[in-house]
Amino acid sequence: MKKILEVLQNENGEIRFDTDIDVNLYPEAIPNISSMAAFSMATNLWGGNEMSVLAVLRALTLADLSLCVNRKEMLEQLEHGSEYLAECLNTVRKEFEKAGEEIHVIYPGSGTGNKCS
């Protein structure tokens, strides 16, 4: 098992990060992680803590964006990358639904899953 991202906060409030992924050696790891994470987020494989996990992921994203040298450029890259991934995942979602699988979508700000129709 690989550690994609470990985020720990110590008793002093300091946050520490760790990963087993070396993007310099394996740049293809990032798009692979994005698609696998999106698939997991669209299923019931979370373990019941979806709202808290998404809230923390979004907090980390906000922190990252706040430190960007060029936020506008970063947001454009995120927009284009997420749009492409969304198109791919919608195709997969439709195939899962045809097979009778239940798909959940977590909408921004809601933190709750809703079945796609």
Image: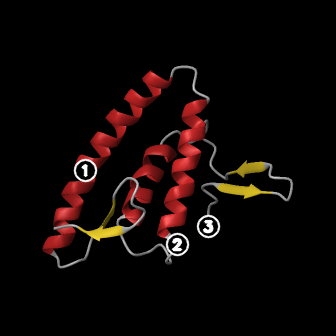
Residue 25 position, x and y percent, is 60, 39
Residue drawn at x 74%, y 57% as measured from the top left: 8
Amino acid type assigned to the residue bearing label 2 in the image: Asn
- Quadrant occupied by the C terminus: bottom left
**Quick check: 11 left or right of 96?**
right
Residue 48 position, x and y percent, is 49, 77
**Quick check: 19 left or right of 12?**
left
Residue 67 position, x and y percent, is 62, 29
Q: Which mark is residue 107?
A: none
* Distance Cα–Cα, label 1 vs label 2: 26 Å
Who comes first in sequence, dot 1 or dot 2?
2
Question: Where is mark 3, residue-wise?
Answer: 1
What SS does tag 1 mark? helix
**Quick check: 75 left or right of 69?**
left
What SS does tag 2 mark? loop
- All told, the count of numbered labels is 3
Amino acid type assigned to the residue bearing label 1 in the image: Cys
Residue drawn at x 35%, y 35% as measured from the top left: 79
Mark 2, Cα crowd under 10 Å, few <14 / some 14-19 / many 20+, is: few
- The residue sitting at the left extreme is 98
Looking at the rendering, which quadrant does residue 80 occupy?
top left
Question: Where is mark 1, residue-wise?
Answer: 88
Mark 1, Cα crowd under 10 Å, few <14 / some 14-19 / many 20+, is: few
Amino acid type assigned to the residue bearing label 3 in the image: Met
Mark toward the viewer: 1 or 2: 2
Looking at the rendering, which quadrant does residue 82 occupy?
top left
Mark 3, Cα crowd under 10 Å, few <14 / some 14-19 / many 20+, is: few
Question: Where is mark 2, residue-wise?
Answer: 49
Residue drawn at x 27%, y 70% as measured from the top left: 103
What SS does tag 3 mark? loop
Who comes first in sequence, dot 2 or dot 3?
3
Mark toward the viewer: 3 or 1: 1
